[in-house]
Amino acid sequence: MRIMALDIGKVRCGIAISDPQEKIATPLCVLPTEEVRANAPSFRRVCEDWEPELIVSGLPLTMGGAKGPQAQSIREVAQQVASKLGLPLEFSDERLSSSEAKRSLREQGFSEKEMRGKVDMIAASLFLQSWLDKRMAGSLKGEANES
């Protein structure tokens, strides 16, 4: 089954997808959050092309593990998206995924301007990969994964 990750931000939404064996996360694209929220043709096309069966949304937790200030807003958007797609929804701790994505892009020589369109989809692939690894190890539990 393919699993789609959404790194939902105020402006942009990074999208990543797993392989059918649920072992490898791959960054796909970045779309305006409003297009994802509205189930616009651009987002529907991505979903039709990849046929996900589960959505994993990043959930911004504080460094202490509590729900961050944006968590409720992100939960609402993710629930709307999953509902429109008719897919189950889970959440994954996305702490440091954007920082790690930026670090990785800097190491590859990207400028801040060049990174702008890539960070969100790479962050989505990072927290999806972590989620897949935990699931494979059978240790998926905790508040960040609640539906």
Image (spheres, helix red, strand yellow):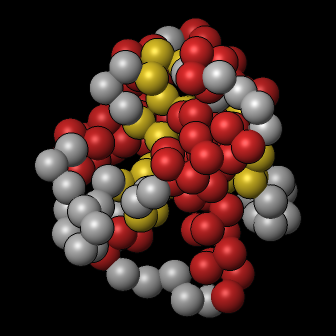
Residue pictured at 20% horizontal, 55% vertical: 68
Q: How many marks?
A: 0
* Residue 55 spot, x, y in % from top left: 53, 49
* Relative horizontal placement of residue 108, taking residue 97 as reference (left or right): right
Q: Nearer the viewer, residue 62 or 7?
A: 62
The quarter of the picture where residue 14 lies is top right
Q: Position of residue 112 (x, y in %)?
A: 57, 23
- Image coords of residue 52 (percent x, y): 67, 44
Can residue 117 be seen by looking at this rendering?
no
Task: Check the image and name the residue furthest to the top.
Answer: 41
Q: Quadrant of the C terminus?
A: bottom left
Residue 63, quarter of picture: bottom left
Q: Residue furthest bottom?
A: 138
Q: Residue at x 69, y 38 (%)?
A: 105
Residue sitting at 24 percent across and 74 percent down? 64
What residue is rendered at 80% in x and 66% in y? Answer: 23
Q: Quadrant of the N terminus?
A: bottom right
User: Taking 86 as reference, is 143 above or below it?
Assistant: below
Q: Nearer the viewer, residue 103 or 72?
A: 103
Q: Is residue 93 toward the left or the right of residue 120 in the image?
A: left
| Residue 126 percent coordinates (x, y) | 62, 55
Q: Vertically, is 86 above or below 142? A: above
Q: Is residue 9 something one can see in this rendering?
A: yes
